[in-house]
């Protein structure tokens, strides 16, 4: 069996399968960021409430699940989802690049370039942000977060967002996240075959609304801390 035959047989090499993987894993992260954004807003209720919520996440599914058990399952799901999402993105880009040298070289170039740049560079930015964010607020890596206090998410959030450059970095990452969510949600509908001339405008509006709600909902927390509205 030659190489091309082997490729044809493997479902992993199919563009449709990879797009479906992108769609499902993207949806998992859309769900996570929406709930995470909503959960963060509890910071406006006060330290006790916010920390109780953070601790409550560790007891998700109790009494059926023990401490950290369901959270660990969910964290594993998120890691698998992001790895598959990045893998299929890289793989689809390679396939598209190989196809583009022989086929359409000019057609819809501008729109495709805009989307590709937003998704690729934006996606990379989000991945770098995520590493910084976890080092800062979850792992408490001393070099990033010298004042980190275990089990005091409220104090850690307050300490992090005293710094204008850190808040600036969060804002840049959130803009990247917003663009990624907007284009990604629209692509998701396309992959599911739900886009036509009639639905396109509504899907774009819905994707824009989701992106705005998520970005603004996240952004108010660092900004409120920096400007002294949460102390
Ligand atoms: C901009 C405002 C944000 C704030 C104030 C914030 C706050 C936090 C805090 C306090 C934690 C630690 C929770 C704990 O250990 O109890 C955390 C964890 C996390 N955040 Fe954020 N976050 C923000 C944005 C984001 C964004 C935009 C993403 C994703 C793109 C994200 C992804 C995560 C992940 C994956 C975790 C780890 C969850 C876990 O440990 O189970 N966060 N965040």
Image (cartoon, helix red, strand yellow):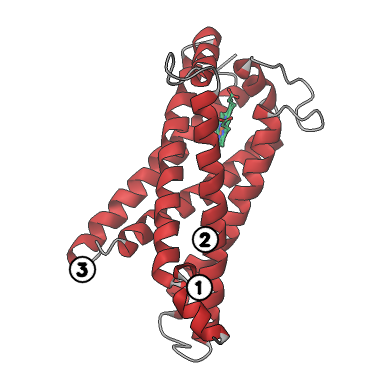
Indicate whether 199 appears above or below 65. below
* Residue 123 appears left or right of 169: left
Q: Residues within 10 Å of mark 2 (few under 14, many from 20)?
A: many
Residue behind mark 1: 113
Give the mark count. Answer: 3
Residue 101, relative to residue 85: is it above or below?
below
Q: Position of residue 30 (x, y in %)?
A: 42, 44
- Give neighbour class at mark 3: few <14, some 14-19, many 20+ (Cα, 10 Å): few
Q: Does residue 231 appear to the left or right of 88 in the view shown? A: right
Cα gap from disc 1 to disc 2, whole angstroms? 10 Å
Return the disc, 1 or 3, that comes first in the chain's sequence: 1
Residue 107 % position (x, y): 41, 85
| The label number, if any, that marks residue 197 in the structure image | 3
Q: Quadrant of ligand 1?
A: top right
| Residue located at (64% from left, 40% from top) | 168
Give the residue number, with chain letter if any, for mark 2.
119
Instruction: For the N terminus, give its image quadrant.
Output: bottom right
């Amino acid at each position: 069996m030659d190489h091309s035959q082997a490729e044809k047989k493997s479902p992993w090499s199919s563009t449709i399968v990879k797009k479906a993987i992108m769609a499902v894993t993207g949806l998992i992260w859309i769900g996570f960021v929406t709930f995470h954004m909503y959960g963060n807003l509890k910071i406006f209720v006060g330290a006790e409430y916010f920390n109780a919520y953070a601790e409550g996440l560790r007891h998700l599914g109790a009494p059926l699940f023990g401490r950290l058990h369901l959270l660990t399952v969910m964290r594993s799901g998120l890691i698998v989802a992001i790895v598959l999402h990045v893998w299929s993105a890289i793989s689809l880009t390679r396939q598209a690049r190989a196809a583009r040298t022989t086929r359409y070289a000019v057609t819809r170039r501008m729109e495709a370039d805009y989307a590709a740049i937003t998704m690729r560079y934006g996606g990379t930015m989000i991945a770098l942000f995520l590493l910084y964010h976890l080092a800062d607020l979850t792992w408490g890596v001393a070099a990033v977060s010298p004042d980190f206090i275990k089990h005091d998410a409220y104090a850690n959030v307050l300490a992090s967002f005293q710094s204008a450059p850190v808040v600036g970095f969060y804002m840049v990452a959130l803009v990247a996240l917003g663009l990624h969510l907007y284009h990604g949600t629209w692509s998701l509908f396309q992959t599911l075959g739900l886009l036509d001339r009639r639905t396109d405008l509504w899907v774009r509006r819905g994707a824009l609304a989701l992106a705005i709600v998520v970005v603004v909902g996240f952004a108010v927390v660092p900004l409120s801390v920096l400007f002294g509205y949460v102390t």
